[in-house]
Amino acid sequence: MKNKQFIEKLRLPIIQSPMFIVSNSRMVIASSRAGIVGSFPTANARTLEDLDQRFTEITSALGTGENAPPWAVNIIVSKMYARSNDDIELIVKYKPPIVITSLGNPEQVVEKVHSYGGLVFSDVINLYHSKKAIDAGVDGLILVCNGAGGHTGDLSVFAFVSEVKAIFDGIIVVGGSISTGESILAIQALGADLAYMGTRFIATEESDASDKYKDMVINSSASQIIKSNKITGINGNWLEQSLNEAGIATDQGNAKGVLGDLKRMAMPLIKKKLKVDFDISKVTAKRWRDIFSAGQGVGSISNVPSIEDLVLELEQQYKQAKNNIL
Ligand SMILES: Cc1cc2nc3c(=O)[nH]c(=O)nc-3n(C[C@H](O)[C@H](O)[C@H](O)COP(=O)(O)O)c2cc1C
């Protein structure tokens, strides 16, 4: 697959980003058939046999070779992830057109994926790691910015994209709170090539998220997303209601009546001081499965469509936004 050329053939410049527990082969197939790029993390397959099965499902449905629609797989390249080498062997066998690396240095993956003509994108949260990934020879950088679901970055999208553009002429993908067609157009205006969208796809028919999780995404707004490094050891964004239900106090959920209204109005100020402090070893709820992650883009999500319908909805918003500024 040639650099950048595949983007022009997409219906919308979107990667449905990989999500632990949530993404599955159905999402990849539905996304890629709808004209965007679907993806899933190899870690969602419990065993190598399961991963082999998922790759078989995807390649049988989407086909292989030059004319097949692009799709992606995400692999953790860190010693923390024991199955890394075995997963890479399966990647080389099934040749996903795009491989997304997270957490570690992508070096070991780049040569292998390039050998079969695939592209490597690396997700990064700062300029230091961007430079390391560029040195490793990646084709694309995924800038995970402030407000993203999962393990989030802290940088403003405006600041990060312009700094990276100054040192990198490969593919630039941007993630963090992108849930609408308007936001997709906005990141193109900044000079990015693709939008990296996770949270919006939690609330789709095909996703593996439970109904409770989907409901919470629909019913939450940006100020109910709590950033904490206490859940996994790395900064992540979590749905406040799921933290509260797991017995983790966030100090803002339970206020009622007039006092509650005042408190909510003052929330932006309170939030600056808000520190979610607890001992994770005393929490019995499982992170990701019971403590739900989502980004600040939850506020604009109000339905659970099929992926095909969602892409149509995003396309209409995108076109309207383009008309509005011309
Ligand atoms: C529930 C959830 C699980 C995630 N799991 C992964 C993962 O396994 N690997 C990964 O690289 N990123 C993971 N992410 C991050 C997303 O791929 C992406 O960076 C993020 O969703 C983009 O921001 P947005 O959610 O605001 O759209 C996850 C995000 C969420 C919401």
Image: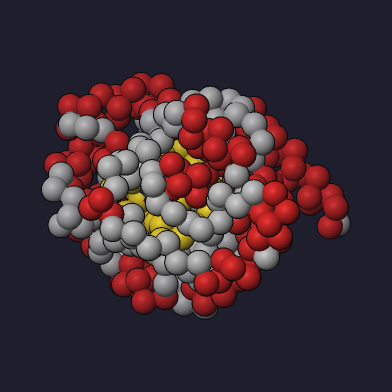
Q: Residue at x 55, y 51 (%)?
A: 253
Looking at the rendered structure, the number of numbered marks drawn on it comes to 0
Q: Specify the quadrant of the image occupied by residue 106.
A: bottom left
Any part of residue 110 in sight? no
Look at 37% across and 63% down and name the residue there. Answer: 277
- Vertical position of residue 176 compared to residue 205: above or below: below
Q: Quadrant of the C terminus?
A: bottom right
Side of 118 where 182 appears, left or right: right
> Horizontally, is 100 left or right of 319 in the view?
left
Image x and y of residue 263, in percent: 66, 60
- Horizontal and vertical percent position of residue 184: 64, 52
Residue 133 shows up from this direction: yes
Taking the spot 32% from the left edge, 41% from the top edge, the residue there is 285
Question: Relative to 202, does residue 183 appear above or below in the rendering?
Answer: below
Residue 144 in percent (x, y) is at: 47, 61
Q: Kindly identify the residue that appears in the image at 27 percent across and 42 percent down.
A: 284
* Image quadrant assignment for residue 292: top left
Most foreground residue, 326 or 204: 204
Front residue (pair 157, 290)? 290
- Which quadrant would the N terminus be assigned to in this image? top left
Q: How is the image coloured?
A: secondary structure
Asked if 91 appears above or below 192 in the picture, the reply is above
The front one of 303 and 9 is 303
Q: Position of residue 179 (x, y in %)?
A: 62, 47
